[in-house]
Image: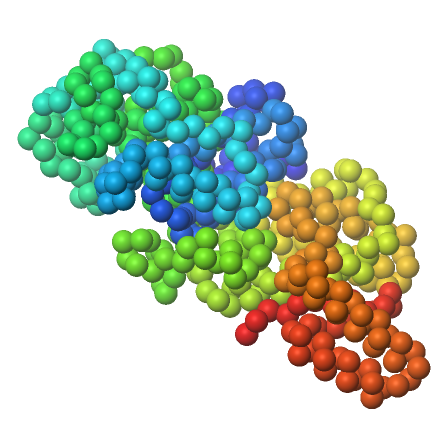
Amino acid sequence: MPLTLYDTMARKKRRFVPSDPRRVTMYVCGPTVYNYSHIGNFRPVVVFDVLFRLLRRLYGDEAVRYAANVTDVDDKINAKAAEEGVPISAITDRYLAAYNADAAALGALMPTAQPRATETMDAIIAMIGRLVHNNAAYAAEGHVLFNTQGFSDYGKLSGRPLDEMIAGARVEVAPYKQHPADFVLWKPSKPGEPVWKSPWGPGRPGWHIECSAMIEQELGLPIDIHGGGIDLVFPHHENELAQGMCDGHAHEAYANYWLHNGFLNMDDEKMSKSLGNVALAHDLLEQQPGEVIRWALLAAHYRQPLAWTDEALVQARNSLDHLYGVLGRARSVAAGGSAALAEEQLSPLLDDLNTPAAIAELKRLATDLDAAVRKGLPTAATLKQDLMSLADVLGFLQAEPQVWFQGGADEGLRVQIDELIAARDAARAAKDWGEADRIRAELTALNVEVMDGPAGATWRIKEQA
């Protein structure tokens, strides 16, 4: 079954065919690092991590090049640095490290490249120069602006007329613009802000040109896949596309496939810092394992809105507890079987990253594996292989079952619990049910749940109410 992806530009699903299967390229817009990122910011991180994993499975680990940028010069960064009286690098280094740590905790693989705007300044200035040379941009009052009227396909990605796009976006009105939709490529820095030299005067780049320059420098054009949140279609991706197609290099496309994930909503509103309805991933990870949060982020199809609720996290935890419980009971089974059969389990993901269907398949495999283990069937080995193969592409079941269930206990508590479990087993063997019940009550008081099974008792630390 071939991989098909919904292409925003085409408004339909298309079979994915890379320009070069030996070098598959993907770019996803990354964070602006001035604070901890909210969980909505991590939806594209997790979604495109699944696609990254899937592409690596299909084309080989070394064949896939995935770049996710870092915006490390921005008004919010400047304001934060001024507030703390430190260079912008002190802010950006701090919050990029936090962002990467949170992404890793959510099971996201590190991208192949993570370019930073401040480290791409030469390429940014060179690209602006080419746009000016090609009459696709013009200088005015210390600014350089892109000439949207000079690019006939402007608006093709978002599919809306220019007047409608302007009305629906926050477009800066300035007397030096030739058209209201023209956007800034370079602008003067305000006093105290970071500044770079350029042929148009000292200043700093606009947001859109940063991504275009980083894509061209890291991946070359055209790229196979460009991803990001649905809110980036206009103006950011529309402007990226215009810049990339007008910089003088001969190429027929900027990106061959455009993928966009839906919003993450809280209380029926898009989660955003401006609305004040944010849940920081950094805080959530102190309350839940990363896999639980990852499961909740993948529970809806990536193109659909996702409602973020406490109930979604409870359901995710219960589902993962079930899967890890099955793995624990199948610990004596050696995974093995046909690799071709394992590829069949990827079919939901090959259909435009249908993660809800893939999760349902994961649960089915776990149920079948549990039954095969109980009955001693030889199919258990293949079922376990298929389960682990699909889980790996989804980024689940990355821990050992014992670690998953007992991760909330320190070494001293583990020793105490193991001694109580052994004492309870001895009481049960002696048919001293009263003593067995007393020990179980003692374990319950320690927030421990005991699970009896054919292979003996196992335990887990229960979630705090």
Residue 13 image position (x, y, % from top left): 50, 39
Residue at the (27%, 53%) spot, across then down:
274
| Left or right position of 40 against 297 | left
Q: How many marks?
A: 0
Colour scheme shown = rainbow
Q: Quadrant of residue 195?
A: top left
Residue at the (66%, 37%) spot, across then down:
1
State the quadrant of the C terminus. bottom right
Q: Quadrant of residue 22?
A: top right
| Left or right position of 319 against 219 | right
Residue 259 image position (x, y, % from top left): 45, 38
In the image shown, does 237 or 115 lie closer to the viewer? 115
In the image shown, does 113 or 155 lie closer to the viewer? 113
> Residue lying furthest bottom in this view?
434
In the image shown, does 189 or 44 lie closer to the viewer? 189
Residue 450 image position (x, y, % from top left): 75, 73
| Left or right position of 10 against 452 | left
Residue at the (85%, 59%) spot, across then down:
373
Residue 115 visible? The answer is: yes
Residue at the (58%, 57%) spot, across then down:
289
Residue 443 image position (x, y, % from top left): 72, 76
Rendered view: 229 above or below 359: above
> Residue lying furthest left in this view?
175
Rendered view: 350 above or below 123: below
Rendered view: 65 above or below 85: above
Residue 157 visible? The answer is: no
